Amino acid sequence: METQSLLVKQQNSKTIVKSPSLWKQTYLRLKKNKMAMVSLFFLMFMFLLSFIGPYFSPYILDRTDVANMNQPPSASHWLGTDNYGRDILTRLMMAGQISLTIGIAAMFLSILIGSLLGAISGFYRGIVDLVIMRLADILMSIPGLPLLLMMGAILSEWKVPAEYRLYLIMIMLSFVGWPGLARLVRGQILSLKEQPFMQATEVLGLSDRRKIFHHLIPNTVPILLVVATLNVAGSILSESALSYLGLGVVPPTPSWGNMMDAANNFMDFRKRPWLWIPPGTAIFLTVVSINLLGDGLRDALDPKLRR
Amino acid sequence: MSDTLIEVSNLKKYYTSSKGLFKKLSDPVKAVDGVSFTIKKGEVFGLVGESGSGKSTIGKTILRIQDKTGGEVKYKGQDIFNLSKKELRHLRVQTQLVFQDPFSSLNPRIRVGDAIGEAVVEHGIVSKQEVRAHVLEVMEKCGLSPFHIDRYPHEFSGGQRQRIVIARAMALNPEFIVMDEPVASLDVSIQAQIINLFSDLQRENGLSYLFISHDISVVEHLCTKIAIMYLGNIVELASKEDLFNQPLHPYTKALLSAVPIPDPTAKRERILLKGDIPSPINPPSGCKFRSRCPSATNLCSEKIPEYREVNKDHFVACHYV
Amino acid sequence: MSEMLLEVNHLVTNFHTENGIVQAVNDVSFSIREGETVCIVGESGCGKSITALSLMQLIPENGKVESGEILFAGNNLLQLTKKDIRRLRGNEIGMIFQEPMTSLNPVFTIGEQMIEPIMEHLFLSKKDAYKKAKELITMLGMPNAEKIIQLYPHELSGGMLQRIMIAIALSCNPKLIIADEPTTALDVTIQAQILDLLRDIKKEFKTSILLITHDLGVVAEMADYVVVMYAGKLVEEGPVLELFADPKHPYTKGLLQAKPVIGERKERLYTIAGQVPNLTDLKDGCYFADRCEHVQGICRKKQPDLTDVGQHQKTACWLYKEGAR
């Protein structure tokens, strides 16, 4: 009892207890989520493998080796070789660079376009809102994949060189991705604007700048972060699908999707699983990890949602 | 004392529900339908009414957080809907609002100290270096311990959050505060703490309040002048003594008799009102209260009763007073 | 003396949360006689609603009734099967909740929601059930039952919906009605109507009522017997007249003095300092000790038991213990 009342007294004295910042609290909560942490470490491993791994590979990316065609995994070629004699592991790592870069870049582009247009819509309303939202509606009413296929086919028709296709794919993916984000951000801003604490900023006479940058945006960032994470997974999947169909990243540039193309060939599919299992596994695990991380982030960011 | 602080005359606020491309305008909701009153300096003005009476709408409109449909609101003789941007900013410092829900009226991502201090710095009342000292001083006045300053709102209970909201308002040193059901969501023992805080702050700083509540016993305790609202109109307005000793409007009488009194031995004549509060979209003709009034006549459905001064400073809107 | 209808003995209900175990209801005992209205009063988080839900075994998933017994007409409810409980819920015990809006399903009409329990519990045909529903609506003072029965919940006001909830609770002539803050969401004038209705029901059908509320005014108007709860514990109980005339526990006293009352002009309101303790982190001793004006050494060491004070009144406070001073 004595110690307890002492504790109370201490608290009541001058010691100011500074709560850790909300980002830190989020991180601490995320750290408790095992699935999310495993996913995070796996993703970090994937990044290291893809971006640093190739430097340790004794094989040169596009060098064909007729003597070692279609070799199964062995000590010298850990994941075997493909039908040009290229090392699968090296190609997998390079493909990882491409796929991850496309996924992240496409995410950044769609977030940029989406949140900008969404914020403008939600904040200013009126005719601007009407135009932007109808445009988003139109884009969202066309199924994403066929649209991408069409654009991919056009790229092929125009014979765009392989190295430029990469950038065009990013733009294509973000073109399909922004309407959903714009709607989300707009909805967020609309509902935040009705919150009493936003009314309070009005009563307190805060400037528009402060309202937007100190009150509105910080409250949209958490949800945006979650959606952005999940968006990366979506972009990677779309890119893989396109490349698999030969309409995305085209050989010789490797991507996880176009490496999967081997599964199209009956002989390769039956007899040479080392051609398509590694890229397939890479796509699967990466996407699952990103989704788990996204879910973990959502729970960590909003403690109210948790039970 | 003739120091009129706020003068509201014939204030109207209608809400129209849709403005879509193909939709017709529906009938407006007449949330506030011609309300007049004045609040003097240092006065605690109570506004009582049930849901849909328009009491919160008045609170927000006289601070110009939302637009009016008609009428006039003057603060210190100036029409507040006719202010330049700079003058409006100046008004924001002098008038404040305390919300009903202490949970949603604080930004969850801003620390308590920053929430209290940000407007003070914005308006240049205190410099950035001195703001922390100022915030601590205000917090102490509002019964918050200084070690709370660097915490987030979600770490506090409802009563403490309401203190934070009050501190945020008090930091600007306002002259007039609208209290919109500030204790409705609090428990009785916490409610008493906050009500006492209101009285203390009012007395020490010579503040004027517009105190909006559905709880007449709280209003009676705190206010000097009370207006009773029903469906967008004031039906009776009088000093506290007059209103409770001699209620004139049948609605006021019924309302007073409906409040449960924590005394099982109290014997009271209860006036039970029939039926529900009508919708403000389609209120009854004539006197809006006639559908529930125990003594309504034909006249009440035909003619809107005039809001008039019956005794000195005692206003009523009823044909039969 | 009329017969005992419900007896709750040493009820303990815990919640398992990630912050630890919350003792929502902590060793609570009380009883209700036939035709009696018992009010449980307390502030938010004191366990009054959980007590009511425990009786019906409707507590949320992470909660559990750990021990104690609930005797209803001689049967221990905690030992009944799920099926029996469900039968009991409609037939013998009716329940009314705080939010009439959310207690009714928005996609069914009032009639559909009323006849379903009537058919199930009273074994009536659909036609007869409809007739019964209409009778109930008329009986509760709502004109044109014919029309109301066809409406959807959103087309009715809160007061009307609460009447419908009462009608549903009454439909099978229950012996006990549990009403959890039935008027908190309603306006004062509507609250008066509903309280009046509950009083009439009690008089006419000799129904016992367990009323959960935070409003001492409502308690004074409705109760025969009052139970005051604080932080999951029963701190004081007694007949309404005795308890209001001479409250013993400092918390009950504080509550009664903290509420402004019309006609009683006071300069300042009495306040109870501090806040309700965190239920996951309770100390030894009386839970009210930190807020109590009369706190003494023993209060922080040991929890006081309920002791008789006055004729029928009991309180759990060291002030009234012989030799504790």
Image (spheres, coloured by chain):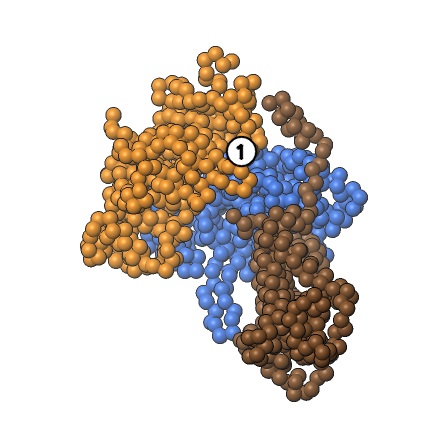
Count the marks: how many?
1
Regarding residue C43, the answer to whether it shows in the image is: no
Q: Position of residue A159 (x, y in %)?
A: 69, 86
Residue pictured at 53% horizontal, 18% vertical? C298
- Residue at image position (80%, 44%) is B129
Q: Nearer the viewer, residue C209 or A17?
A: A17
Q: Secondary structure at mark 1?
A: loop
Q: In this picture, is B302 found above or below A143?
A: above
- Which residue shows up at 78% across the image and 42% down it? B130
Q: Chain of mark 1?
A: C
Q: Is residue B267 above or below residue A183?
A: above
Is residue B150 at least partly visible in the picture? yes
B119 relative to C143 in the view: left or right: right
Inspect the image, locate mark 1, and give the three-letter code of the amino acid beneath it. Answer: Val
Q: Residues within 10 Å of mark 1 (few under 14, many from 20)?
A: many
Q: Colour of chain C?
A: orange
Left or right: residue A239 compared with residue B277: right
Residue at the spot of label 1: C276
**As drawn, A223 above or below B49:** below
Give whichever of A75, C35 is nearer the camera.
Answer: A75
Measured as percent of width and height from the top left, residue A151 is found at 62, 81
* Quarter of the view holding residue A3: top right
Q: Residue B140 is drawn in which quadrant?
A: top right
**Extreme residue in the top direction:** C323
User: Which residue is at a point 57% across and 36% down the rendered structure image?
Assistant: B194
Residue C198 at x, y percent in the picture: 31, 40
- What colour denotes chain B? blue
Image: C215 above or below B114: above
Q: Position of residue C32 (x, y in %)?
A: 31, 31
**Quadrant containing the N terminus of chain C in the rendered view:** top left
Chain that appears brown: A
